[in-house]
Image (tube, rainbow, N blue to C red):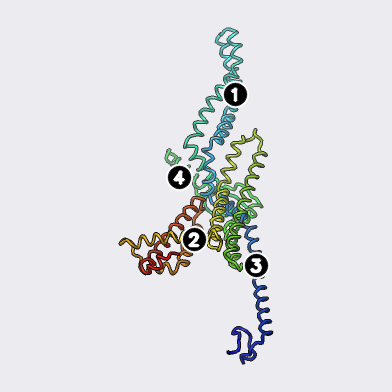
């Protein structure tokens, strides 16, 4: 028998030195030690990346939400639009507008004028004296009339449209100032905020000309901006806006990258994927709990005389609903990812589910192979030979769809999951059909 040589063992000067039993044992010990150190380094690196992912996950969600609300006018309008149709908010607006309108009516003066008119007209003294007490009923009547009319306006579609238009224009103006864009009527130049009245000047000039003032056409196109105010903090606010835009855009990307690196660095990729998904899910639960606590603190801090509790709750829930939706969506994605990672593992339940799915696909493929309608042939056999690749491609396509989807919701996640499962099931059935067509013995044997 030829002497035992180790191909990957170090040789002495290329002479093919044969290792003695002691040398071989030492070599194996050193190799195992190097492997252990390498695995420990990978575990340490993966742990650090995992912890960074957990810390940044809720911050990234909040940063992305704030960036959307501050810099995206359409998103902001979509956020505040439901407030115009919320009954609690409508009641608050109606009551406050009613009080302001009624406050402008001098009911006492009206009652005094009525009493004077009656006295001048020679009305009986009793009638004149009774008219002095009409201030209370008159105020109540005016309040009722004004309240009904204001309520009719506030609950109409016109108020909804006016609410959205006002918020859109105001938000766009603020964004133009904070970003330094030269669009819109309100703009920032250096530390100066200016109002461009060029459009107003054009409209006034044209209206005057239409009404016969022909000389109005000579109004010059100069001094079309009005300086509203100077502020030294404007540049700081613009810097903060740029920082927010960077954080809202790149912090989520950084978090996803760190999570991917943690999974790639760990020796056991599947286990680390499951742990990372569970950790992100836990952080989303923590974020949702924190939002619930902040909501309770906010409602307790708002005096009922300033804002009714139901209206305050409606405002808080409306403003933060997209943040909660994002946290819930990530929680569902994390749960699905963790379950998928477990189902690909060696666990008893996972093996049972995979075996049951394979038996079902094989039975369906065997049934379809006996009909002239479905003949997958070589395509089915190719799918059977490349199950892992095709399955990974389908799962990757689903993940890519979620990444490219603009603000996915829980419903979108469930829809993508169902589509992925359906496609995987179809691929399994087609692969089983190809096997049944080409290799009946294997099809009969089952998984």
Q: Nearer the viewer, residue 56 or 242?
A: 56
- Mark 3: few/some/many CA within 10 Å (<14, 14-19, 20+): some
Q: Which residue is mark 4?
A: 217
Q: Nearer the viewer, mark 4 or mark 2?
A: 2
Q: Residue 52 appears at what percent x and percent y?
A: 64, 61
**Residue placed under numbered mark 3 in the picture:** 43
Q: Earlier in the sequence, mark 2 or mark 3?
A: 3
Q: Earlier in the sequence, mark 4 or mark 1?
A: 1
Q: Position of residue 273 (x, y in %)?
A: 58, 62
Where on the picture, by quarter, is residue 120? top right
Q: Nearer the viewer, mark 2 or mark 1?
A: 2
Q: Which of the pair 301/286 is nearer the observer? A: 286
Other residues around mark 4 within 10 Å, as few (<14) / some (14–19) / many (≥20) = some
Q: Residue at x 59, y 22 (%)?
A: 107
Disc 4/disc 3 C-alpha distance (Å): 78 Å
Q: Which residue is mark 2?
A: 354
Spot occupied by residue 311 in the image (x, y as percentages of width and height): 59, 37
What's the CA distance linking mark 4 and mark 1? Answer: 44 Å
């Amino acid at each position: 028998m030829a002497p035992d040589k180790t191909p990957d063992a170090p040789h002495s000067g290329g002479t093919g030195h044969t290792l003695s039993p002691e040398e071989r044992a030492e070599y194996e010990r050193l190799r195992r030690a190097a492997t252990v150190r390498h695995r420990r380094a990978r575990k340490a690196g993966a742990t650090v990346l995992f912890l960074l992912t957990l810390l940044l996950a809720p911050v990234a969600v909040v940063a992305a939400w704030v960036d959307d609300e501050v810099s995206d006018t359409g998103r902001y309008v979509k956020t505040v639009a439901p407030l115009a149709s919320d009954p609690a908010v409508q009641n608050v607006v109606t009551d406050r507008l009613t009080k302001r309108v009624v406050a402008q009516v001098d009911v006492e003066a009206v009652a005094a004028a009525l009493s004077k008119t009656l006295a001048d007209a020679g009305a009986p003294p009793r009638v004149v004296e009774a008219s002095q007490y009409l201030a209370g009923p008159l105020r109540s009547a005016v309040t009722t009339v004004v309240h009904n009319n204001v309520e009719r306006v506030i609950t109409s579609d016109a108020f909804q449209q006016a609410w959205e238009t006002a918020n859109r224009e105001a938000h766009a103006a603020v964004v133009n100032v904070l970003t330094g864009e030269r669009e819109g009527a309100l703009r920032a130049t250096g530390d100066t905020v200016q109002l461009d009245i060029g459009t107003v000047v054009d409209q006034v000039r044209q209206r005057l000309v239409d009404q016969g003032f022909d000389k109005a056409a000579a109004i010059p196109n100069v001094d079309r901006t009005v300086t509203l105010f100077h502020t030294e903090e404007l540049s700081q606010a613009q810097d903060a806006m740029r920082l927010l835009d960077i954080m809202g855009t790149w912090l989520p990307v950084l978090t996803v990258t760190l999570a991917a690196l943690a999974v790639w660095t760990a020796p056991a990729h599947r286990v680390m994927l499951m742990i990372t998904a569970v950790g992100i899910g836990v952080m989303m639960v923590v974020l949702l709990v924190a939002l619930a606590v902040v909501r309770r603190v906010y409602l307790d801090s708002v005096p009922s005389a300033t804002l009714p509790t139901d209206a305050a709750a409606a405002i808080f829930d409306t403003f933060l609903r997209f943040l909660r939706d994002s946290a819930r969506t990530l929680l569902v994605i994390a749960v699905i990812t963790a379950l998928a990672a477990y189902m690909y593992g060696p666990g008893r339940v996972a093996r049972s589910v995979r075996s049951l799915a394979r038996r079902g696909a094989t039975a369906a493929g065997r049934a379809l192979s006996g009909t002239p309608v479905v003949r997958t042939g070589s395509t089915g056999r190719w799918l059977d030979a490349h199950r892992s690749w095709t399955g990974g491609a389908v799962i990757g396509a689903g993940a890519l769809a979620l990444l490219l989807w603009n603000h996915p919701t829980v419903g979108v996640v469930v829809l993508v999951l169902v589509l992925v499962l359906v496609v995987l099931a179809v691929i399994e059935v087609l692969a089983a059909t190809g096997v049944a067509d080409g290799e009946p013995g294997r099809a009969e044997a089952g998984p």
